[in-house]
Image: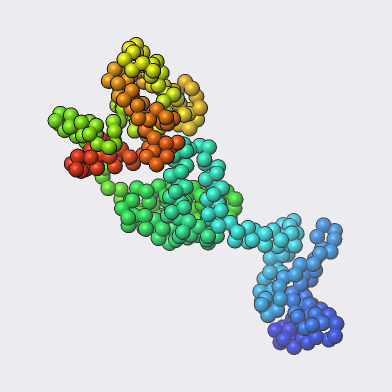
């Protein structure tokens, strides 16, 4: 005979615990205190086991029977319901603790060896400034497309259209990492993929402003020389370069006698190591990818002039506030905007 809702409600404490059987090992346990809970006694692996399904009335009769059937199905599949219940509970706890930021930090640590230091810093900066404040504390299993799109819209609204697309790629990679840990399903990736079509199109690129007339090209270095910014020594335009040059160190220049300013230099050279070249990460440790730049007479003269000012620093162009660091990557751009009463602003940039 199976239980009814009326019989369950009518069950009262009797001074000691007792059971009300339902069917196939499922029963209602009534404690001496009056607390009622659903339990399932079963055989597995030659032993008798007990699964506590939940308390009544939180778990009603129909729900208890449904969970009882699920447990029986597990047994038929050769799985212990108690073990599976513990595993499911641990998965739920892990999913709650696995916030987006926690998984993102793991992903950043794993990717760092594959990136250049500058790229690693850039990706971290974007996550810390644009993403963590929005949903860094959200369990990654609870992340949805609306949250992601809202964060990306904020980036777009400040005019950083391409950055929004890149950040979406970072988020997808992090969620994919979580999928590998079975913290999210494949549908989580589908939501982020769908967002791609909702982002604004990237504006057409335009050429960097650059001086093209001979008069202007002659005027620029003269104006730089007269400014407080000093002279910028470019070994050769095709070295790529503002990034490599601004962090150049004196020990990279060879075959120059610094103690004799008038001494001839038959073969002056700038030796740029592979670590500082714009290469794939795996090639940066290969000395064969270093780059030797022959220096012109004019470049050597400029270097000697600069050395009078910055020889006490490791860097040719030290930071204005700390000579133990190189000048910032925005220093040249700021110089072009400032000198000559601002007449080069919008007309010339370092990459022009």
Which residue lies at the image location 53% right of the left edge and 37% below the top edge? 113
152 sits left or right of 346 in the view = right
Q: Vertical placement of 1 versus 50: above or below? A: below
- Number of numbered labels in the structure image: 0
Q: Nearer the viewer, residue 2 or 56?
A: 56
Rendered-image quadrant of the N terminus? bottom right
Q: Vertical placement of 98 versus 270: above or below? A: below
Which residue lies at the image location 26% right of the left edge and 42% below the top edge? 205
Q: Nearer the viewer, residue 276 or 67?
A: 276
Asked whether residue 349 is in view, the answer is: no
Asked whether residue 247 is in view, the answer is: yes
Q: Position of residue 260 (x, y in %)?
A: 36, 16
Which residue lies at the image location 42% right of the left edge and 31% below the top edge? 313
Q: Position of residue 299 (x, y in %)?
A: 30, 22
Splitting the image into 4 quarters, where does residue 269 fall? top left
168 sits left or right of 89 in the view = left
Q: Vertical placement of 49 versus 159: above or below? A: below
Q: Position of residue 315 (x, y in %)?
A: 41, 31
Q: Vertical placement of 180 versus 213: above or below? A: below
63 sits left or right of 346 in the view = right
Which residue lies at the image location 43% right of the left edge and 44% below the top edge? 122
Colour pattern of the rendering:
rainbow
Q: Position of residue 347 (x, y in %)?
A: 20, 40
Rendered-image quadrant of the C terminus? top left
């Amino acid at each position: 005979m199976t239980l009814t809702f009326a019989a369950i409600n009518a069950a009262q404490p009797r001074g000691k615990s007792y059971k009300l059987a339902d069917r196939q090992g499922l029963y209602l346990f009534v404690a001496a205190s009056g607390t009622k809970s659903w339990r399932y006694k079963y055989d597995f692996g030659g032993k008798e086991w007990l699964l506590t399904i939940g308390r009544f009335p939180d778990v009603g009769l129909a729900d208890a029977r449904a969970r009882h059937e699920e447990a029986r199905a597990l047994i038929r599949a050769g799985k212990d319901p108690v073990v599976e219940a513990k595993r499911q509970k641990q998965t739920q706890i892990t999913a709650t603790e696995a916030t987006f930021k926690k998984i993102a930090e793991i992903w950043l640590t794993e990717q760092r060896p594959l990136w250049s230091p500058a790229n690693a810093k850039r990706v971290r900066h974007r996550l810390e400034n644009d993403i963590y404040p929005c949903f860094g504390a959200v369990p990654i299993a609870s992340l949805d497309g609306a949250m992601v799109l809202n964060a990306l819209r904020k980036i777009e609204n400040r005019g950083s259209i391409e950055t929004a697309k890149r950040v979406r790629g970072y988020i997808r990679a992090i969620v994919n990492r979580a999928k590998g840990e079975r913290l999210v399903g494949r549908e989580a990736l589908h939501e982020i993929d769908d967002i791609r079509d909702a982002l604004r199109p990237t504006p057409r690129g335009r050429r960097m402003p650059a001086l093209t007339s001979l008069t202007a090209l002659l005027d620029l270095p003269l104006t730089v020389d007269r400014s407080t910014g000093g002279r910028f020594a470019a070994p050769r335009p095709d070295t790529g370069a503002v990034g490599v040059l601004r962090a150049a160190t004196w020990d990279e220049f060879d075959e120059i006698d610094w103690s004799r300013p008038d001494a001839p230099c038959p073969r002056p050279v700038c030796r740029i190591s592979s670590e500082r070249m714009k290469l794939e990460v795996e090639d940066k440790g290969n000395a064969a990818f270093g780059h030797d730049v022959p220096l012109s007479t004019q470049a050597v003269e400029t270097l000697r002039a600069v050395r009078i000012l910055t020889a006490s620093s490791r860097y040719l162009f030290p930071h204005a506030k700390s000579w133990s660091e190189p000048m910032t990557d925005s220093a040249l751009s700021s110089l072009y905007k400032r000198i000559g009463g601002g007449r080069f602003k919008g007309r010339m940039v370092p990459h022009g």
